[in-house]
Image (cartoon, rainbow, N blue to C red):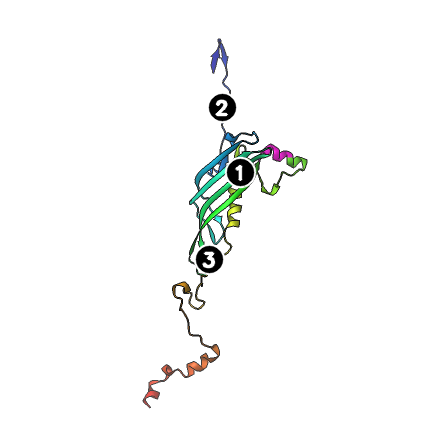
Amino acid sequence: MTTVRGRPRLRAPILERTITAEKTSPLVLDTHELGRRPGSMLTVRRTVPAPADLGTAVIGIPEGSELELDLRLEAVMEGVLVSGTVTGRAVGECVRCLDTVHEDVSVELGELFAYPERAKAAEESGDDLEDAEDVYELDGDLADIEPALRDSVVTALPFSPVCRADCPGLCSECGARLADDPGHTHELVDPRWSALESMFDTSNVSDETKES
């Protein structure tokens, strides 16, 4: 409490804003500095660790590996438009020979994060925001780009990654990697003759027969 001209003056209560662990993610962008004046822009360039499970079952960007963000935040009437590129390096498994595959990934983002009140007003009036399927909603001043990034990365990754276009794969008989032994072959025996082959196998002849 402070005193002004002999009269006590109460301090205004301090409002603390609690930020959850999710909101401290490096993929959550704070747009407060941008403001809401349409046309205002802010550039975000940073290196952040990749989140878990960024990819598919056969290839993805490993958790904790570097993601390069080169983004532009622009204030528009409906909210904040986030556009730019995110690059990283994916690691996977060749679907033919199971060897490790490395692939550079660069995806384009172009997502609208609507102001909460604009999104609510549009919902109540039954009006759709422009390109509604690509519209997310701001959480206060925070824009979480992780969902949009996941969608973009998954569609950019190869459905069936290969170590090289002409990978010969594995031997169907023994599983050997054919690229390591181009001349690798197996003697093919017709199963119809296998029984006869065993009958004439001299290794099965008894010692007595040999002596006679």
Disc 3 residue type (three-letter): Val
Q: Residue 202 carries which label?
A: none
Q: Label 2: which residue?
A: 14
Disc 1 residue type (three-letter): Val
Q: Which of marks 1 and 3 is nearer the N terminus?
A: 1
Q: Which of marks 1 and 2 is nearer the N terminus?
A: 2
| Residue at 66 percent of width and 35 percent of height | 124
Q: Of 24 and 188, which appears nearest the observer?
A: 188
| Residue 131 in the image: above or below residue 175 | above
Rendered location of residue 131, percent (x, y): 61, 41
Magenta span includes 191: no
Front: mark 2 or 3: 3
Q: Of 205 and 78, which appears nearest the observer?
A: 78
Cα separation between marks 1 and 2: 32 Å
Q: Of 23 and 126, which appears nearest the observer?
A: 126
Front: mark 1 or 2: 1
Tell me if mark 2 has few (under 14), some (14-19) or many (20+) residues whose alpha carbon lies within 10 angstroms of its own.
few
Disc 2 residue type (three-letter): Ile
Q: Label 1: which residue?
A: 82
Rendered location of residue 50, percent (x, y): 45, 44
The secondary structure that most of the magenta stretch takes on is helix
| Extreme-right residue of the structure | 125
Cα separation between marks 1 and 3: 33 Å
Q: For the C terminus, which image quadrant?
A: bottom left
Tell me which segment is drawn in magenta.
Answer: 114-121
Mark 1 in CB contact with mark 2 (< 8 angstroms): no
Apparent side of residue 124 relative to residue 68 in the rendered image (left or right): right
